[in-house]
């Protein structure tokens, strides 16, 4: 086996798997997989790092950096985004407006979100949340939505499916505001150069003070990475603030301005926290502030969901979590509100004609934490166990993974062999003599690499 991989005397210092014939075979495999992979049952897209939470996080980071308000995750907008994504896959279109009169506002209204302002961003074919966000920020119309002061709420859906004959990842981002209140970016104010009409002389007896301004007493927060903010009075120059949680110092921050901010650099644990701020080196403490971290979505156990066929409908039943606020079923482009009975059990009947290939159960709590459970499989009849074609395709999926995975595996393998060849040639003092052949292999590898990664992009709409 050594002669296939390692340059040695046995193979004249040219491993069999790095010779011209091998490169031709690699090229043929890559062409077949990337051209006909779909017919062989090999999915095109790899696992994506795009999730609703990291899309929302990137959006809010961009807004916060510009001095804008951050957006609250809204369960109704999330359901609307999910319904829009399902509808695009069902009807097979890629646009804000569908061929049957579908509009973004239709999905938002159907979800029960009575908006004053609303907007929508779409993306497809991306592999990372950063790639989606950068593409949106590079488009004036999409950037205008992300940076608009008209919005308070956001909902995002990320759905994988086949659109217009190609496996892809759809991202739907919806914005909204239930009121006419808008926001403006908070600019950094330059020091005033005007002379006050009357000098302000501090009264005798002023004392130094410190207080926590965020979070506020009794706040319940879903962001476990919340920063602690506060301000001081009558403190000049640079100073250090120590943050105490339950009487123990958890960190400190320095400032030379009235306001200060503390980043714990790790998540606050679930539950209650009692905070106090103290100016280091001085016996000056703030009042205590108690807040609660609740970043856990409502707990609906998928295995406990029961679905019963009743003629032309299905009955769905499950125990509702105690902390749930809203429960919705999104089936295709339809959104159904589910109500909890007095015994805490949710029972809902849905007609078979209202069911789509994709059905998602969504529940949110009072803080805005959302759980999404795909229950599509509950409504699909089992396929014939003798269907050899399906078994064969499933086997191919398990063995080969994805077309991207196969491509990356081949170019990584060739790179490893090439690196070993270069090292052995250098150790033998033959690097110069073999430079031409090594350059040819390297050029082939680079061309294939660029071709593979060229597909790591997407479209926005």
Image (cartoon, rainbow, N blue to C red):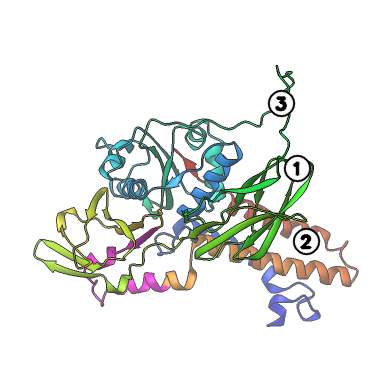
Vertical order, 198 against 304 (above or below): above
Secondary structure of the residue carrying tag 1 is loop
> Could you tell which of marks 3 and 1 lies nearer the N-terminus?
3
Range of residues picked out in magenta: 370-395
For this orientation, the residue located farthest to the top is: 197
Q: Is residue 257 left or right of residue 381?
A: right
User: Residue 356, image x and y in percent?
Assistant: 24, 55
Give the residue drawn at x 86%, y 64%. Answer: 431
* Residue 380 in magenta stretch: yes
Q: Which mark is residue 438?
A: 2
Badge nearest the viewer, 2 or 1: 1
How dense is the environment of label 3, judged by Cα within 10 Å: few (below 14), some, or many (20 and up)? few
Who is closer to the viewer here, 260 or 428?
260
> Could you tell which of marks 2 and 3 lies nearer the N-terminus?
3
Give the residue drawn at x 76%, y 67%. Answer: 419
User: Residue 451, image x and y in percent?
Assistant: 60, 51
How dense is the environment of label 1, judged by Cα within 10 Å: few (below 14), some, or many (20 and up)? few
Q: Is residue 461 left or right of residue 12?
A: left
User: Residue 437, image x and y in percent?
Assistant: 78, 61
Secondary structure of the residue carrying tag 2 is helix
Q: CA–CA distance between discs 2 and 3?
A: 78 Å
Who is closer to the viewer here, 282 or 345?
282
Secondary structure of the residue carrying tag 3 is loop
Q: Which mark is residue 200?
A: 3
For this orientation, the residue located farthest to the left is: 311
Give the residue drawn at x 31%, y 66%. Answer: 321
Kindly check if marks 2 and 3 are in contact, taking CB atoms under 8 A apart as contact: no
Q: CA–CA distance between discs 3 and 1?
A: 21 Å
Vertical order, 186 against 435 (above or below): above
Could you tell me which quadrant the C terminus lies in? top left
Q: Which mark is residue 256?
A: 1
């Amino acid at each position: 086996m050594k002669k296939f991989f390692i340059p040695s005397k046995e193979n004249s210092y040219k491993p069999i798997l790095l010779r011209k014939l091998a490169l031709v075979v690699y090229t043929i495999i890559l062409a077949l997989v990337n051209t006909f992979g779909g017919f062989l049952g090999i999915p095109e897209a790899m696992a994506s790092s795009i999730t609703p939470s990291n899309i929302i996080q990137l959006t809010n980071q961009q807004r916060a950096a510009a001095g804008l308000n951050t957006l609250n995750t809204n369960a109704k907008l999330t359901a609307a985004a999910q319904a829009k994504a399902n509808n695009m896959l069902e009807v097979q279109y890629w646009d804000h407006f569908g061929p049957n009169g579908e509009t973004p506002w239709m999905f938002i209204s159907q979800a029960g979100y009575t908006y004053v302002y609303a907007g929508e961003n779409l993306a497809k074919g991306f592999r990372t949340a950063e790639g989606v966000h950068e593409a949106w920020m590079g488009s004036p119309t999409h950037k205008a939505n992300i940076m608009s002061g008209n919005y308070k709420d956001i909902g995002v859906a990320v759905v994988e499916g086949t659109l217009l004959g190609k496996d892809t990842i759809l991202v739907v981002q919806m914005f909204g505001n239930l009121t006419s209140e808008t926001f403006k970016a908070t600019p950094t104010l330059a020091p005033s150069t005007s002379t006050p009409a009357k000098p302000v002389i501090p009264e005798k007896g002023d004392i130094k003070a410190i207080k926590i301004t965020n979070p506020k007493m009794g706040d319940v927060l879903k962001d476990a990475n919340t920063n602690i903010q506060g301000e001081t009075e009558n403190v000049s120059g640079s100073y250090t603030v120590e943050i105490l949680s339950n009487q123990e110092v958890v960190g400190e921050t320095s400032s030379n301005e009235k306001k200060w901010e503390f980043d714990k650099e790790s998540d606050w644990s679930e539950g209650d926290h009692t905070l106090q701020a103290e100016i280091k080196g001085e016996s000056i403490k703030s009042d205590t502030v108690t807040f609660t971290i609740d970043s856990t979505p409502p707990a609906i156990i998928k295995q406990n969901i029961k679905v019963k066929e009743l003629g032309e409908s299905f009955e769905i039943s499950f125990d509702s979590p105690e902390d749930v606020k809203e429960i919705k079923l999104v089936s295709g482009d339809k959104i159904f509100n589910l109500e909890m009975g007095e015994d805490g059990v949710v029972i809902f009947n849905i007609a078979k004609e209202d069911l789509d290939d994709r059905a998602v159960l969504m529940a949110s709590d009072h803080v805005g934490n959302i759980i999404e459970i795909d229950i599509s499989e509950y409504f699909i009849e089992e396929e014939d166990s003798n269907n050899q074609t399906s078994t064969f395709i499933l086997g191919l999926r398990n063995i080969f993974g994805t077309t991207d995975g196969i491509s990356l595996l081949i170019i990584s393998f060739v790179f490893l062999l090439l690196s070993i060849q270069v090292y052995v040639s250098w150790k033998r003092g033959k690097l110069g003599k073999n430079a031409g052949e090594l350059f040819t292999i390297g050029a082939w590898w680079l061309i294939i690499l660029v071709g593979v990664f060229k597909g790591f992009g997407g479209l926005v709409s």
